[in-house]
Image (spheres, helix red, strand yellow):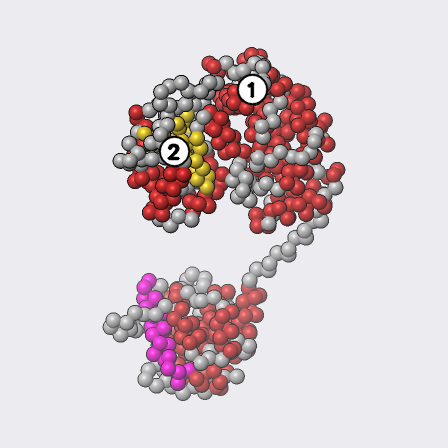
Amino acid sequence: MWNCFVNIPTLSTLKDYDCCFKGWKKAERGGLGRGAEQSVTKKGERSPSPNSMLRVLLSAQASSARLSGLLLLSPVQPYCLGPGKWGDRPPGGAPHAGPVQGLQRLLEQARSPGELLRWLGQNPTKVRAHHYPVALRRLGQLLGSQPRPPPVEQATLQDLSQLIIRNCPSFDIHTIHVCLHLAVLLGFPSDGPLVCALEQEQRFRLPPKPPRPLQPVLRGGLRLEAALSCPRVQRHPQQHLIRSLAEARPEDLTPHVMVLLAQHLARHRLREPQLLEAIAHFLVAQEAQLNSKVVQKLVLPFGRLNYLPLEQQFMPCLERILAREAGVAPLATVNILMSLCQLRCLPFRALHFVFSPGFISHISGTPHALIVRRYLSLLDTAVELELPGYRGPRLPRRQQVPIFPQPLITDRARCKYSHKDIVAEGLRQLLGEEKYRQDLTVPPGYCTDFLLCVSSSGAVLPVRTQDPFLPYPPRSCPYTTRDPAQRVVLMLRERWHFCRDGRVLLGSRALRERHLGLMGYQLLPLPFEELESQRGLPQLKSYLRQKLQALGLRWGPEGG
């Protein structure tokens, strides 16, 4: 059982072993007790940390039992080993009596394992719990002493083990923890009586773990609601939600659960047709029980994810709800129309209502008047550009406000991940600062990433010499000026501008590009896949040069 101790004095790591204990002594002198011995390392040597002992033992030819014992326990902290931890004050807080302090000094100065055992065995009334970690630490110093450690009898080690085993029920958890670490570091077998007794006492001192609560059996909508808050949804959102939805009965799907599902899809840009079709079917089936405040949340993912459902009654159902609820909740009504605007499915009857003088007058005095006017301005732009057959009322010019006067919130939040700065630097070196404008907002309020003015011959012109804005509303007849300049807009298509699958633009992005194109701007998309494949500024400049030349653009001395 004690064969592991036979190898300790003859290992090639005795020097490191001794340095480890010296390092522990150094930690004690650092402020954790004044009774530490004045042992120092050699000049120029760094005192090893307590973890050095683990490295020494792991690198030695130790038995599997010793190694397993080391791996099962967390490393001991240096402050646990100093004599000041036990020598200055007892657990109760009062100073030790003189004989108790004297016994600690005797243990620290013992010259052999037999002397250690003698001091402990001959003074039973003076031995306290904190003396046993001191004895184990001194034993380690003796086993690692130079040049030749004293001989160790197995009977001595067995007697010391029995002393600790007999008294460990009176130890506190801290003393048990330190003794257990020291015993393992000294090579006591992990399945031996000492380590087993200390581990058993440690388990008794630890508070019991509370029983794991029984998971309730969730059915129907509760299962889907729980799935929306499950971490697995983030890793495999479609499969987990589809399975939970399939297991739910129709009568268990409440508006609350379906709103949670719709918000989850919109928030995480999950364009999952099965889930979106389920929401559309629920909206149609529950039309009579839904008000416009719930409907606006159910319709949100369709516009954001640029998905028009296959449900044939989807649009007729929404038109009936708008007709019924338009005057009750103005903001919800406009939100529904915003989602339909992204889908290019604006119902004329609802437009007549929101552009009526009564509706506009009604929302003017509400707290959300500005946001409603901004949405109405966008709807009016959509009518101007996409609904030539509309003959109803329009938003008065004095009520119109810029739609998106600054970059969208998602772009501002993720600006550090954007390619805009490096593209701007590439254009500056390629064209010059005077031949492009960055983050320019053009009427009726769309923010552009980069705008170039180009002559009819393809030459890139200085922006300061041209009006960068095209007229809005756009003219119905072609330009009659002698040299009309074209406006080229470079559109960054970042990764977060797309649905999670990376192939379909989000509804708001598609709407902006669609409207800019209808106003007469020539668009040059820069997809994130192509931008991410460019390694460094030189490659990016070459990429931009190819993109611009493909449009027939010229610049520099030959471009004018």
Judged from the image, the secondary structure of the residue bearing numbered disc 2 is strand
Which residue does the numbered mark 1 point to in the structure image?
A: 388
Q: What residue type is labelled 2?
A: Phe
Q: Where is residue 294 in the image (x, y as percent from the top left)?
A: 64, 30
Residue found at x 46% / y 18%: 477
Residue found at x 57% / y 65%: 204
Q: Write the start and end of the magenta stretch as one range.
A: 8-31
Magenta span dominant secondary structure? helix
Q: Quadrant of residue 405?
A: top left
Tell me if label 2 and label 1 are in contact, CB under 8 Å: no
Q: Position of residue 45 (x, y in %)?
A: 28, 72
Q: Which mark is residue 543?
A: none
Circle 2 or circle 1, nearest the eye: 1
**Would you say 197 lies left or right of 322 here?**
left
Q: What residue type is labelled 1?
A: Pro
Which residue does the numbered mark 2 point to in the structure image?
A: 450
User: Vertical placement of 116 versus 231: above or below?
Assistant: below
Asked if the stretch drawn in magenta spans residue 22, the answer is yes
Q: Quadrant of residue 558?
A: top left
